[in-house]
Amino acid sequence: MKKNRYILFILIVVLIGIPVIYNLPPVQERVGWRVAELFARFKYAISPPEQMVFIPEKHNLLATSPVPAVTAPTKIPTNSMPVASPIPTATLKPLPQNIQLNGFRHEYQVWNNCGPATLAMALSYWGWDENQQPIATFTKPNPRDKNVMPYELTAYVEQETQFAVILRVGGDIDLLKRFIASGIPVILEKGFELPKDGWMGHYVLLTGYDDSKGRFIMQDSYYGPDQVMDYADLVSYWRAFNFTYLAVYPPERKAEIESILGPYLDEQYSYRAAAQTASNDIYTLAGRDQFFAWFNRGTSLVQLQDYAAAAEAYDEAFVIYPDIPNKERPWRMLWYQTGPYWAYYYTGRYQDVIKLATTTLDTMSEPVLEESYYWRALAREALGDTEGAIKDLRSALKYHPGFEPALTQLQLLSPP
């Protein structure tokens, strides 16, 4: 009898201890991602995510359904403005034909950690001596989080370091080279593809270029140091993220940064310029690239608060999506960009918000996107489903503890 109790006690300790040990950060870093990868491959074999397609309903309820006030997860400019003209370049100084910056500490990423690892490399150039871990802890409290947004990387620099940072969209090859020629590396968010995994988002740090070979040199947390990519290929992959770039720099170099940016120093100018670039691309590209162009137009118009036009642009993107070959479909797109939620929500298309968020979460092996839960909660609340909204807000906080927009909205719906 005593022996049976002892065995039972041991079994209980083991059953309780295994989950505790498994969730320890060092174990997760070495083993957790392998388990998650196996589970993902199993689920995707049964239910291929590239075959799941969102079709917008295009029901505009704005005339009959007022849009309630919500807590915005990112800052949006206050005025909608027309599309910008291209930046003049006649007065800019000639660039050297090639340049390579040195003084980096390359760092390979741990699982789903390219954002923190890339930012750590950029900071190391300026003498910062930490690694990706504190950045990851700040930007993704849940290590299972699939992505770190550019604004989250920016927040880390502003709140946790002595450095300054600039985040803009609508960049181009010439602007990137001007940063590098001034001794300032640039972080890009761009597309990335692996044969077995398909399209996804990825951060890289540009540290050099060579006009004679038409290529950039970059520090890649996945592939390794001093990787190269042709200008044309970089533009193609960069297009997926509206030509987004970040540059970290010492505060005393602010005037130099402003000179490099020119009119792009004005955020709204950058969104107008990006919208113009997207509009041009729409009529010159086809297939997946045209999908990205329509998506970019919507994203820029969201930031300019032209939600109706943004919703129309996203509709066009989603109409193109089913015609993209399955292996090329960017089915992870909503892991990285939330613009369609803004556009559909602020035009009263709450069912489209719910449908898009549900489709996005259903394609994941681990449904851990706090932004998708948050926007689905807002749409459910707008349709009178307070119970469903509260459930989604709690899920958002489960997967991202302390996520301020969800926390604030939950307190409004379910005060303590």
Image (tube, rainbow, N blue to C red):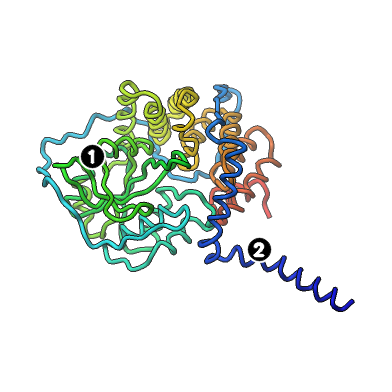
**Looking at the rendered structure, which numbered label has been put on residue 19?**
2
Q: Position of residue 255 (x, y in %)?
A: 20, 52
Dot placed on the residue nearer the N-terminal end, 1 or 2? 2
Q: Quadrant of the C terminus?
A: bottom right
**Looking at the rendered structure, which numbered label has been put on residue 125?**
none
- Disc 2 on helix, strand or loop? helix
Badge 1 density bin: few <14, some 14–19, many ≥20, Cα 10 Å: few
- Disc 1 on helix, strand or loop? helix
Q: Looking at this view, is 237 or 351 the one in front?
A: 237
Task: Find the distance from the CA under tag 1 to the CA under tag 2.
Answer: 48 Å
Residue 187, above or below 66 = below
Badge 2 density bin: few <14, some 14–19, many ≥20, Cα 10 Å: few
Does residue 51 appear left or right of residue 267 in this picture? right
**Looking at the rendered structure, which numbered label has been put on residue 173?**
1
* Amino acid identity at mark 1: Ile
Q: Position of residue 130 (x, y in %)?
A: 37, 67
Q: Position of residue 297 (x, y in %)?
A: 38, 29
> Which residue is rendered at x = 57% and y = 56% of the image?
401
Does residue 110 appear left or right of residue 188 in this picture? right
Q: Quadrant of the N terminus?
A: bottom right
Does residue 25 appear left or right of residue 223 in this picture? right
